[in-house]
Structure formats: C-alpha cells, structure tokens
Image (tube, rainbow, N blue to C red):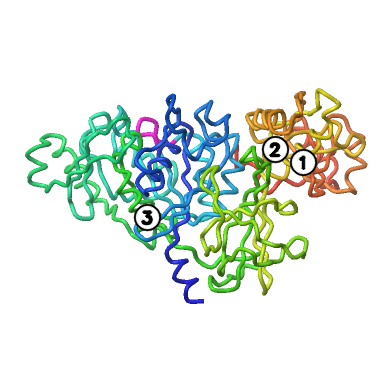
Amino acid sequence: MTDVLHEAARRRTFAIISHPDAGKTTLTEKFLLYGGALGKEAGSVKARAGRKSVTSDWMEMEQKRGISITSAVLQFTYRDCVVNLLDTPGHRDFSEDTYRVLAACDAAIMVLDAAKGIEAQTLKLFEVCRQRQLPLITFLNKWDRPGREALELVDEIESKLGIVVTPVTWPVGYAGDFRGVVDRRDGVFTRYTRTARGSTMAPEEEVDPERAAAEEGEAWTAAMDELELLDEVGAEPDRELFLAAETTPLFVGSALTNFGVAKLLDAVVDHVPPPSPRLDVKDEARPLDAPFSGFVFKVQANMDRSHRDRIAFIRVCSGQFERGMVVTHGRTGKPFATKYAQQMFGQDRETVDEAYPGDVIGLVNATDVRVGDSLWLEPPVEYPPIPSFAPEHFSVARVRDTAKFKQFRRGVSQLDEEGVVQVLREAEVGDQAPIFAAVGPMQFEVAVDRLENEFGAPVELRSTSYRLARRTDAASTALLRGMRGVRVVERADGTLLALFESPFWVERLEADHPELVLDRLVAEGAAG
C-alpha cells in the first residue's frame, strides 16, 4: 500500500468560501486557467455571447443570475499535485450545501472583497470552518478597484474572526492603484500587467527591491512602512499554527485580472495539508493505507439532462478505489457495485478507474445512497453523520396538474435526497401536500424550477406561518397535535418534528410541560 500513501501525499482537497459577489467563482475559474484545466482562456461568471460559460456554475439558474447555487467538484494537476477544488454556493440560503462540502475538505480559502472586508455570510462560513477546525487561507480580492487600507482589513479580520493574520504577500499601491505584491518570504516585488478581460494568465515581472523603490516611489515606501509594522508585531507565518486553524496566511490580488492568482495557487500546494486519517463515529482514526472507505457528502440528479441520472459524490478517506470493486453500503449493510464510477469536472464527467484519499468520485445511479452514508471494504467503518440545518422557512407544495402527480412525487423525493429542501410530511396528507422546509427562500425557487423543468411537474407553493422546528418523539406527539399553532410532521429519515409559529410559544410549552421532548436540531443557528 506504499502507493496509497504516496498518492495521498500528492492530494490537496479544499473549498473556496466567500460572501456573494466577493469573487469566489471568478477565482475558481482562474485556478482552472492557471492549472491548465481550461486550455488558454477562462470562462466568465456572466458569460458574453459566444464565450464559454463559467465551469463551476453549470445550472441554468446559476448562469442567469451570476451566482453559485450548487456546489461543484473540479480536479486538475498542478506542480505534480492533484488538486481537488470544491466550489461552494456563496448565498446564505444555500449554507447547508456549503456545510456538507466543507465536511469533505482538508482546508478552505476565504475570499474577501477589499472594499467590504468581513461580511455577514463570511462570518457564518468562518464559524463552520472553525467548528470543523479547517486550516484557512485568506485572499484579499479586487485590489485593482477602490477599497479599504490593507492594515485596516487585517485588523478587522483579527477582531471579528479571532484568528491571527500572517500576510505572505503584501500590496504595493493602494486599492484601485495596484502595482503588484511584495513576497515577505524573500522580499521580491512582483509587478503585474493587465490582460484582456483577465482571460489569459497575467504577465509577471520580478523586480529587485532597489529597482522597485526607484520605479514605484511613494507606493513602494508606503508598502515598506506597513511591512515594518507587521514585522514589529510578529505576524510571521507558522505552519503548525496554520494547521491548528489559529492563524491564516494572507494573500492579496485580483481574481478578475489574474493578479496574484499564481501565488495563491502555489500556496494551495505549499500550505494546504494532504489528507490525514479520518476519525470515525468512535473517534478512532482510519489509517490512510487501510482498505478503501469513503462517505457521501452530496447527491445530485440530472446534471446532464440527456442522461437523467443520479450521482452520489464520495470523498475517499482511505485505501485505493478501483472501479468495479464491490464495497459495503454501511447504512444498509448491502453490497454495492462501483462499475459506473465517474470523475467530475463541474457538469462534465469521465470514467475514473482509480482514486486515492482526498479524491472525490461520483457513483452513477446510486439510488439507495444518501448524504452522510459510509462505504467501505473490510474492516467496517462509519464516519460521523452530516447534520441538517434547522429550517426557518416552510411552504406547502402542491402539483398544479394532477395528471403530473407521479412526476411530482418522484421529483419531491429526489430533491429531498439531495438536500435541496427538507421534505416534511403529515401522516394523513402524505405526498399530496408535503411541506418544503428551507434555510432560505431561494431554496424554494430552485425546488420549483427543478420540479417544473427536470421532472415536468408544475407546482404551487403556499407559505405558512411556521418559523422554527424542534425534534420531538412519539410520546410527545399526542399532546402536541392537540395544541393551537403546532404541527407535527415527519422527515424521510423518520425524525418527528414539531413546527411552531413563534419561539415564545416553544418557551412557554417547555416551561408548562417539561415532560415534552422539544430538542433543538444539531446545526440550528449555523446558517442564520
């Protein structure tokens, strides 16, 4: 199994997180450009007529709105390393999808808009990274546009996130007058030259400090003064503290113009840790060279309309995966054939014959596989489940054309399995009028769009007055169902949930009826 350890050491598996419009998807495209995965020209988030659309945003709704709605998996080779880049949705309504993706990563890049700094969604996503103890690299983006001072942004990151910033590259020129960056490791100044629409790699010129001082004048002097301040406070990169998620290396650039992208991609190879042994539900580490194992972090149907298939995304945790091997599906205990294994690149795919720890593979038509399931070869292993977020929005769904009920029921089941929305059912109503539960209202838009366009089932949603859910049990259900303003429903996994219109009503019930089971959901508050 020496090859497994060697191949695992070559893997870098990470996600990119950010507030919407901070430039996350643009940076993703530029990584693919610099990694040689897009040929000579990168796509644009809002593609011009006749140009290639953005690779990671493959859904029609994503391309129309210019935002990321679903996560994407992209693999390419760079500097003899296999880079597994997991693009995440930026909008808070899809925080649950981001949470699942981060469960499959070994690190993350946090992209900040140089004019806006830490925004609300940035803070929420950082907290998720902190919960998972993910090492974090920070990228100050859009330095080619007017923005705030670099030292001010560093102070804000440290004060709001409680993490020490250790700049690796530092800007020469204020935001909006970007000349290039100084690498604190060797003092070399890298000057950048614009390219047409940032579609090709930005030409870089390395300039020694003496020449830079003469040519850049006051901009160079100001940068040197700021670096001197950083030296005085001891903001030096430390790998052990980075891996412990206590410090974050900082890089500066502009993804749109490709300034600083190459140095950031080099940092992924140099700083992001390779896969390490994963802890199972018993807190025991599964060795990397143990027989194959992995867990499902995402399920997606109809990525290719011509195939109409269903793909389960597996993070390989140990051993060598070989296409065709028969593994055990942990939740059911049944054998599972892996003949139809794919390597994903956004919406595109190709057959994959082998994979190693850190890689992500797609198993086609894995109909019984759910998010959080473990797959393994002997000895058995069960990885920790991926919790669901507490929903905050609830709508009743009905099919507008009763002749399309069969398609409606199949589509609702698929969306539930993917986690597009949580589907809640009442025993007496069943599939006739299920309740869609979501972290944010845009999830409803995606659900309606997919039901109509992928499954041919036009639907109408009716909003409800419910605002929060609590986990309950069968013993409490009888009393709860007789109360005003309470509705008891069931998730597909059998969990009973009590829906309430107000948190004050929950507090009163807990005080008046302490015997009732009204538990908060595991990830409640993580998204909001």
Foreground mark, 1 or 2, reads 1
Residue 246 falls left or right of residue 201: right
Where are the magenta residues, as a range?
112-118
Most frequent secondary structure within the magenta stretch: loop
Question: Mark 3 or mark 2: which comes first in sequence?
Answer: 3
Quarter holding residue 193 = top left
> How much space separates mark 3 and mark 2, taking CA atoms?
36 Å
Residue position marked by numbered label 2 in the rendering: 421
Residue position marked by numbered label 3 in the rendering: 78
Mark 2 falls on what kind of element?
loop
Mark 3 burial class by Cα count in 10 Å: few <14, some 14-19, many 20+: some
Picture coordinates of residue 100, whole percent (x, y): 60, 48
Residue lying at 41% horizontally and 57% vertically, measured from the top left? 272
Question: Mark 1 or mark 2: which comes first in sequence?
Answer: 1
Label placed on residue 413: 1
Mark 1 burial class by Cα count in 10 Å: few <14, some 14-19, many 20+: some
Q: Is residue 438 magenta?
A: no
Dot 3 amino acid type: Tyr
Label placed on residue 435: none
